[in-house]
Amino acid sequence: MAMKYVDEFRDPELIRRTSEEIHRLVDSDYHYRFMEVCGGHTFSIFRFGLQNLLPANIELVHGPGCPVCVLPVGRMDDGLSIARQPDVIFTAFGDVMRVPGSQGTPLELRARGTDIRMIYSPLDALKIAMDHPERQVVLFAIGFETTAPSTALTLMRARELNVPNFYVFSNHVMILPSIRTILDSPDMRIDGFIGPGHVSTVIGVHPYELVTEHYGKPVVISGFEPLDLLQSILMLVKQMKEGRAQVENQYSRVVPWEGNIPALEVMNEVFEVRPFFEWRGLGVISQSALKLRPEFARWDAEVRFQVKGVRVTDSKAAQCGEVLKGVLKPHQCKWFGKECTPEHPIGALMVSSEGACAAYYHHVHLRQAIGE
C-alpha cells in the first residue's frame, strides 16, 4: 500500500529494515561514493543522522545543490553595487541577506544605511515597486530551476501591468551543468547520484539520462524524509550490484517524469541560457545559468545598471570550493566551527541551512561539542 503521510516515511521499523537491506547488499570490499546534489538532502542527512545507519564503506559526498552556496563573491558584489546607487530599493530573500561579498553582506550594508529589504516572494518586490514609483526596485533573483518559474511569472506580471521601475538581477542556475562539471573533474570519483527532489519537480526525470548514458552513473531522484533517502541509497546499491546505470524516480509521488510543463513554458518565455556563468568552487561553467531574454530587457537590472560582471577570488580562509566539490568534508576546513560559524559566516556554505557546513555544524558539530 502506498504511503501518504510524513510519519510513514519516518517509521523506525521500515527505516531499520531498509538499513539492514543496504548492509546486506553492499560489497564489503568496495568503497561507495554517492553524491547528494540537493542542499535539502544534505540538511536531512545530517538532521536525521542517516550516515550512522549506513555501512562504513558508503560515503555520502555533499554536492553543489545550495544556490546561495554556489553564488560567487563577484556576483554578490555586482548586486551590492546596484544597491548602493541613488534611488534604488534592493530586495533579496533571507538567505541572501547574509551572503558575504568582498565588502560585507547585504545585512551589513543595510545597517550602514542602504535601502535593502528582505522579501519572501518575487511578487513582494513587484509590489514594492508599484508602491514606490519614484524609486528603482531591484529583485536579486536566485535559485536553481526550482525558483526560476516564480521569477518568470513575476516578470510577466510586471510586463502585463507595465511597471517601469521594477528590475530583476538574475542569478538563476541550472543543475545538470554542475553535475557534468563534477563528473568531468579528473580528481573526482562519484559512483552515483541522489538526484534533487525540488529541482526535479520542475525539470522532470528524463534530463538526468545525460548522466546515465554519457557517464554511466546511476541516478535516483529522492524525496527528503529519512526513508526516502535510505530507499534511494538502496536503489543505487542495487543498480551497481546488477551492473546498471539508469535514472530511477524514488520521489514519484511528487516528481512527474516529464516535469512541470507550464513552469518550463514560462521559464522558456522569459529566460535564455547564458553562454558562461561563474560558480563558487566550480569556476566558469558554460551554458549553466539563465538570463532575461531581449524581450524583457526593459526589466533587466544588468542592462539598466550596466553591471560590470566583476570576478573576485574567494577568501583563502574558508575552503568552500573544496567542500562544494566533495574534496573536503565540512569539518575538515581549518576555519570550520572556529572563525566560521552560522552566526559569523566567512564562507557561503555556513549561511544557508541547506549549506553543507551549516547543516553539519547544527546537527553534528554542536552535538559532539556537548557530548551527545
Image: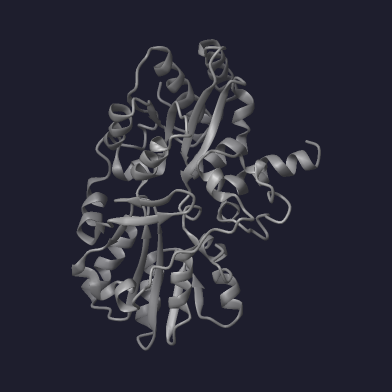
Q: In the rendered view, how is the structure colored?
A: one colour
Q: Position of residue 163 (x, y in %)?
A: 28, 78
Residue at (48, 81) in percent of width and height: 84
Locate residue 79: give its quadrant. bottom left
Q: Answer left or right for 121 relative to 202.
A: right
Q: Is residue 154 left or right of residue 261?
A: right
Please name the residue shown 64% across and 58% down the image.
Answer: 345
Name the residue at 34% across, 44% down. Answer: 177
Q: Position of residue 51 (x, y in %)?
A: 61, 29
The picture places residue 359, in percent across and down from the top left corner, at: 61, 45
Q: Please state the horizontal and vertical placement of residue 110, each as a whole percent of the image.
A: 56, 77
The foreground one among 195 and 326 is 326
Return the residue found at the far front: 186
Q: Is residue 25 above or below residue 359?
A: above
Vertical order, 26 against 353 (above or below) = above
The residue located at (54%, 70%) in the rendering is 106
Q: Quadrant of the N terminus?
A: top left
